[in-house]
Amino acid sequence: MRSVPRRAASVLLALLLTALVASCGTTDPGTRTMARALPPGTPFTHPGVLVSKAQLDVVRKNVIAGKQPWLQAFLDMRDSKYGSYKYVPQPYATVNCPWGGKGAQGCLEERQDAIAAYTQALLYSVTGQHQHAVKAREIMDGWSAKLKRHTAQDAQLQSSWAGSTWARAGEIVRYAPGAGWPADRVRRFATMLRTVYLPEVTRNLPDYNGNWDLAMTDAAIGIAVFTDDHKAFDAAVTRFRGLVPDYFYLRKDGDVPLTPAGSTANTVKKLESYWFKETKFEDGIAQETCRNFKHVGYSLAATAHIAETAWHQGVDVYDDIKDRLKAALDFHARYEMGQKPPSWLCGGRVVGNMGPDLEVALNHLENRLGTPVPAAHKLVQQTRPAGTDDLFVSWETLTHADNPAA
């Protein structure tokens, strides 16, 4: 663990003086349905995209008290480029993201601006300093006034990464007392999410690598909550329940993994090719394990984000996937930390380059369910505080480390 900078004392004093203003939103639901969508007419809980009011309250208390790893996580976030009051957004009307990045326009700027808006929203929630709310609004208003479309081959993936982060940022600012986001700007932002992002992230891409579908569904469920769209929420939950068993294998699935609905990988040979030439399958292995752990990490993060957002809405889809999630965390964490893979696994060589992707899943398994995941726990302890992958995972040690609050 890194030492806390000397200025931490002044940070804590400022927080003690200002943070009490930052309670926000409605209360969380007390009961949860098991892997079903919300009953018709049930209101959404706000804030409730990835983080809840109760969790934000815990974050604030931990930082004010100077507890680790939350204080260091907060300082890292505050001192990042995304936390500056001087951050300048760069909105585009068309974000063009071709495969390979050649000729890309606005892709990096969009992702970074979404992360900056989320960062500023979290900073406002913790500190109550109004400049952070103003900056978050400025970023979101700039994009909602300009963006019209995503184009080229990576349009869906780009829309997923940015859209999921926008929804988190907007949710916090919209329901934070004193944030001052005008109603007409909220409506314009919601229209952007509904008309520019949602059509892209709800497309069917059954032959793409599974991290695409999971990232897309992460964005879809967040947008559904922000826009109070029951139909989109129900569709995201339904899609999620099919995606996770197709991506994370358990022996109970049979000798070979399940085939994604609508996929052309409908023979053993084609399925093995889809799984990057793997021919032997053990509990926890993922469709992209033999590609690299970076993409598996994206999928683990997106899976947990979807389930966490549903959890805050009173729908327990974690219950459907907890065994797969535990197996996948354990399987990949062991090799990420250097355990030698067996010769059958990816030809005896894996590329362990996982990002800051495990906090949300680990928090649910260990702190809500009481299910130990030793390898993942050790890996997370070694890599805390988790920062951002500059795509769609940001500051999750701060928001979810040992934070089972509803």
Image (spheres, rainbow, N blue to C red):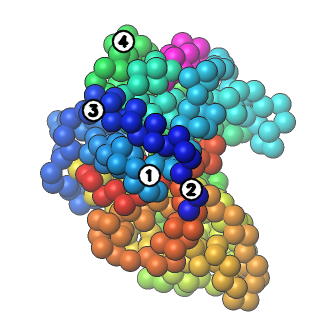
Q: CA distance from mark 4 to mark 1?
A: 31 Å
Amino acid type, label 1: Trp
Q: SS at mark 2? A: loop
Q: SS at mark 4? A: loop
Q: CA distance from mark 4 to mark 2?
A: 41 Å
Left or right: 331 in relation to 107: left
Q: Is residue 115 visible?
A: no
Q: Mark 2 or mark 3: which comes first in sequence? A: 2
Residue drawn at x 72%, y 75% as measured from the top left: 350
Q: x%, y% of residue 160?
A: 56, 40
Q: Which residues are magenta?
A: 136-147
Q: Which residue is mark 3?
A: 20
Left or right: 23 in relation to 239: left
Q: Residues within 10 Å of mark 3 (few under 14, many from 20)?
A: some
**283, above or below 60, in the image:** below
The mark lying in front, picked from 4 and 1, is 1
